[in-house]
Amino acid sequence: MRVLRLQRGMGNAIANRLGNFDWGLIAGQIETGGYARIGPLLSADECAGLIALYDQAQYFRSTVEMARYRFGEGQYRYFDNPLPPLIADLRRALYRQLAPIANDMAAKLPGTAHYPAELEAFRQICHAAGQTRPTPLLLRYEAGGYNRLHQDIYGAVHFPLQAVFLLNRRETDFTGGEFLLLEQQPRAQSIGQAVNLEQGEMLIFPVRERPVQGKRGYFRAPMRHGVSRLHTGHRHTLGLIFHDAE
């Protein structure tokens, strides 16, 4: 029943949930702190339904064993098209809220980047650049698992923000496994942050960099993200990346 519920799609419900948040406040949190926490957005049943998808191979285009590539310890699977309706609805509605924030970020940095208001228009830009493979993914860690600091860049075109959703119960289903962010600034030591999410909560953060106000205007602050080592249990995460992959 949980998987069936995910298959029906909840476009209006998801859009309504997202519309209830203060996106001006969220934009301010991203600008001042480098990330924003939102939630809980997904219910416990929705989280359980997403976890249940992990072992159903027909939903995925590829599986990555992290140790093989020295990415860490764990496994993740990229969804194939068509995306399960809940994920497609969530990706579409969230992009609509994030596009104005992304354009504000781009306007503060050199370049001509501009992001259309709707996800499908942005995906057309990706496809024109040869990026046609979907990038939403599920990640699974067991005790001892972790994810090295990295950036989710899959080609020349990328959207500057992405989101993750914790699907398990912290301190009940697993311990450890904090979400990690590392920001680099010129002529300064890096800034590290550990975020403990709750089940169903969403975290929004930069894919590659963010604009930071300096004495002479804004500069680019590169950012990477990862997951600290799990001590016990299992941890599943849904990752929403808006650009497609080559």
Image (cartoon, helix red, strand yellow):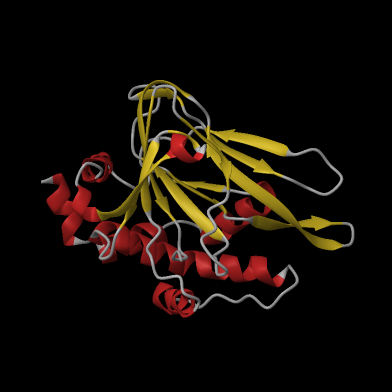
Q: Is residue 5 left or right of residue 223?
A: left
For the image, the number of numbered tags is 0
Q: Residue furthest front?
A: 68
Residue situated in front as seen by the camera: 210 or 20:
210
* Residue at 57% over, 50% down: 151
Q: Where does residue 43 sit, x and y in percent of width and height?
A: 28, 43
* Residue at (50% x, 26% y) in the render: 229
The structure residue drawn at horizontal position 43% and vertical position 79%, both measured from the top left corner, is 124
Q: Nearer the viewer, residue 199 or 130?
A: 130
Q: Position of residue 42 (x, y in %)?
A: 32, 47
Position above or below: 114 against 95 = below
Q: Is residue 85 left or right of residue 124?
A: left
Displayed quadrant of residue 67? top left
Q: Residue at x 69, y 52 (%)?
A: 222
The quarter of the picture where residue 54 lies is: top left
**Closer to the camera in the image, 118 or 188:** 188
Residue 64: x, y in percent?
A: 39, 44
Which residue occupies the extreme right position in the image?
215
Decide if residue 29 is on the left or right side of residue 65.
right
